[in-house]
């Protein structure tokens, strides 16, 4: 299914009119996007390194999971809102940008990995699984999030 | 005087073969900048967790010193890589960066954030025994955490703004702005020498 019409709609929206005509606001929204990225990165890396037994070994896993879950959710909401605002300024260009689609694919995989695999697995208890299963999920998560952030930066270069 | 020295130094860097190669290399420059942003997520991500714990917002059931000490290593690794990649980015485009008002503000904010981090760490280590397990640390520690978050957010914001040419030397600006941005040639022209 071709989704070009969605990008055309975004390009013609009121949001696009605002984002295209306010360079200063656009730059501030980019800062919000970066700070949210750092929040998401900090929480995700901390959780994954805890699962790999490399960080916070003396903090119960349940506490790390509960704390990071809340803030990962907050970061994802702000990243999405600030991302849509930025996308509205260059909607048609993004549609034809392969790095943008790589980022979106990575984002979907990262979200599925977190909400459909990692959290249910942690909720059941890590002791019910082979330690390498947990480590594999943590490494996959780290790799995917780094891929999302890296392809996101390359959108600007292409 | 200082502006002229900085400009001459930037011009000298700009004439180096490696600086030109780095600037003209599409992939290497792109990956250095990507690494700079990725390590920002590591460094600032860890810093956010530490500062939010000092504000009594996250990990309130864990001693503050545990969070600060355990996250210190990955945070410093992130900081180190961020500094190295940042220096390489400066080396690739020295003249425009030296004459960027945003870069100049960023450096000032970086120095202030570094000083605040030193004072904050000293204050924390001197008193942490008395409030380590308190969900909300004392007021002076919270003020330090707020200042840290504000300064580092300012560093990120001004770092992002370097890419914009709103106040580049080729723009028509006031003499004050030319001086603040270090536009030595434009300042001479504006002063009518």
Image (cartoon, coloured by chain):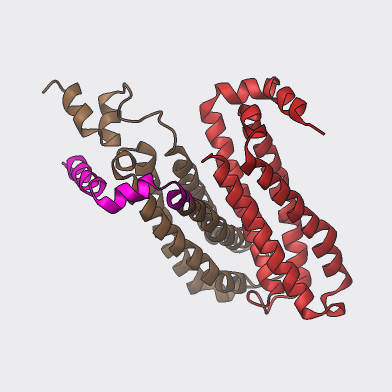
Position of residue B116 relative to residue A28, above or below, is below
Q: Magenta segment range?
A: B1-30
Picture quadrant where residue B96 is located: top left
* Residue B60 appears in the picture as rendered: no
Query: x%, y% of residue B61?
Result: 72, 69
The residue lying at 37 percent from left, 29 percent from top is B167
The residue lying at 70 percent from left, 38 percent from top is A81
Pick whichever, A94 or A59, lies toward us.
A94
The residue lying at 18 percent from left, 40 percent from top is B4
Position of residue A25 relative to residue B123, above or below, is above
Residue A78 sits inside the magenta stretch = no
* Residue B86 appears in the picture as rendered: yes
Pick whichever, B53 or B189, lies toward us.
B189
Picture quadrant where residue B68 is located: bottom right
- The quadrant of the image that shows the C terminus of chain B is top left
Residue found farthest to the left: B193
Q: Is residue A112 left or right of residue B18?
A: right
Query: Which chain is drawn using red?
Result: A
The residue lying at 65 percent from left, 51 percent from top is A148
Picture quadrant where residue B101 is located: top left
Q: Is residue B70 left or right of residue B33?
A: right
Residue B10 sits inside the magenta stretch = yes
Query: x%, y% of residue A98?
Result: 64, 41
Query: Which chain is drawn using brown?
Result: B
Query: x%, y% of residue B71?
Result: 57, 69
Q: In this view, does B32 lie to the left or right of B182?
A: right
Q: In this view, does A66 lie to the left or right of B5?
A: right
For the image, the number of numbered tags is 0
Query: x%, y% of residue A58?
Result: 68, 79
Instruction: Name the dominant secondary structure of the magenta segment.
Output: helix
- The quadrant of the image that shows the N terminus of chain B is top left
């Amino acid at each position: 299914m071709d989704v070009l019409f969605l990008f055309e709609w975004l390009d013609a929206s009121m949001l696009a009119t605002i984002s295209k005509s306010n360079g200063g606001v656009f730059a501030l929204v980019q800062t919000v996007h970066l700070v949210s990225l750092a929040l998401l990165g900090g929480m995700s890396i901390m959780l994954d390194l805890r699962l790999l037994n490399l960080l916070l070994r003396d903090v119960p896993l349940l506490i790390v999971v509960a704390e990071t879950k809340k803030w990962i959710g907050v970061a994802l909401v702000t990243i999405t809102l600030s991302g849509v605002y930025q996308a509205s300024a260059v909607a048609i260009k993004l549609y034809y940008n392969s790095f943008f689609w790589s980022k979106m694919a990575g984002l979907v995989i990262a979200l599925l990995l977190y909400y459909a695999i990692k959290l249910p697995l942690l909720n059941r208890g890590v002791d019910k699984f082979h330690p390498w299963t947990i480590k594999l999920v943590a490494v996959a998560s780290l790799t995917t999030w780094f891929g999302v952030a890296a392809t996101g930066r390359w959108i600007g270069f292409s | 005087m200082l502006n002229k020295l900085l400009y001459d130094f930037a011009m000298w860097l700009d004439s180096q073969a490696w600086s030109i190669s780095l600037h003209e290399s599409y992939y290497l420059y792109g990956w250095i900048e990507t690494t700079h942003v990725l390590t920002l997520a590591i460094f600032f991500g860890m810093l956010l967790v530490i500062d939010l714990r000092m504000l009594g917002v996250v990990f309130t059931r864990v001693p503050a010193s545990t969070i600060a000490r355990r996250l210190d290593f990955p945070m410093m690794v992130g900081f180190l890589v961020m500094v190295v990649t940042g220096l390489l980015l400066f080396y690739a485009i020295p003249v425009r960066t030296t004459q960027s008002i945003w870069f100049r503000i960023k450096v000032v904010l970086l120095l202030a954030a570094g000083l605040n981090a030193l004072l904050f760490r000293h204050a924390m280590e001197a008193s942490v025994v008395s409030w380590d397990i308190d969900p909300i640390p004392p007021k002076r520690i919270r003020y330090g955490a707020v200042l840290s978050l504000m300064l580092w957010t300012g560093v990120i914001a001004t770092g992002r703004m370097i890419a914009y040419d709103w106040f580049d030397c080729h723009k028509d600006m006031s003499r004050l702005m030319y001086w603040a941005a270090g536009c030595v040639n434009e300042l001479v022209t504006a002063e009518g020498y």
